Image (spheres, grey):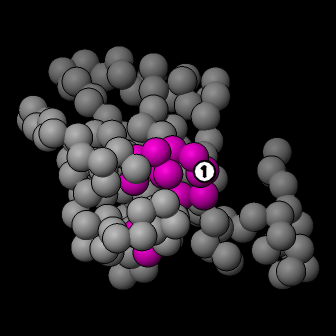
Amino acid sequence: MDKVIRRNTRQRSLILEELKKVSSHPDAQTIFRMVKKRMSSIGFGTVYRNLNILKDEGRILELSFGKYGSRYDGCVDDHYHLICLGCGSVVDIKGPSVRRLDKSLGEIPGFKIEYHRVKFYGYCADCSAKKGGRHGNKG
C-alpha cells in the first residue's frame, strides 16, 4: 500500500516537532497540551486528526493499548518497546539484539516483511521497588 503524503501544514509540522522532542510516548491529550503552549489557537480535534495523518504517512508510530487508548512515538526506526504494567511508562529498546532478530526473521523464505512492532510488558525499576520485588534481568 502506497502512503499518501499530504501538504505539510504549520500545525502538522509543530505536532511532529513536539513529538520528536520527547521519548515518553505521550497520548493525544498530552501532545495537545504540548502543542497548545506554542500555538494557543489549536484545537484538540486538529491535533488528533493530524496525528492520524502523520501515522498514515509513516512519519510517527501509534502504539495501541486497546481500551486504554493510544500513545505516539516520533521515532519510526525499527525498535521494540518495554511497557510498565505499574505506571504505564513506555521505553524504547534498540541495539544489536533488535538487529539480530530483524535479520533472522527477514530471511524467512517466501515472505517479505515490511515492518513489525514488538512490545514487552513488565515492571520498571521504580514500580518493582514499590512492589518490594526484584528488578533486573534473569539470566
Please tell me whether residue 138 belongs to the stretch shown in magenta: no
- Give the quarter of the figure containing the C terminus: top right
Q: Determine whether, in the image, residue 92 is placed left or right of residue 106.
A: right
Query: Which residue occupies 21% across, 25% down?
Result: 111
Query: Which residue occupies 36% across, 22% down?
Result: 106
Residue 35 position, x and y percent, is 45, 62
In the rendered structure, which segment of residues is drawn in magenta? 15-29
Query: Which residue occupies 83% across, 64% down?
Result: 125
Splitting the image into 4 quarters, where does residue 128 fall?
bottom right
The dominant secondary structure in magenta is helix
Splitting the image into 4 quarters, where does residue 127 fall?
bottom right
Task: Confirm whether residue 118 shows in the render.
Answer: no
Q: What residue type is labelled 1?
A: Ser
Report helix, strand or loop for mark 1.
loop
Work out whether residue 118 or residue 104 is closer to the camera in this orientation and state it. Answer: 118
- Give the quarter of the figure containing the N terminus: top left
Q: Which residue is labeled 1 in the image?
A: 23
Splitting the image into 4 quarters, where does residue 116 fall?
top left
Residue 15 position, x and y percent, is 39, 53
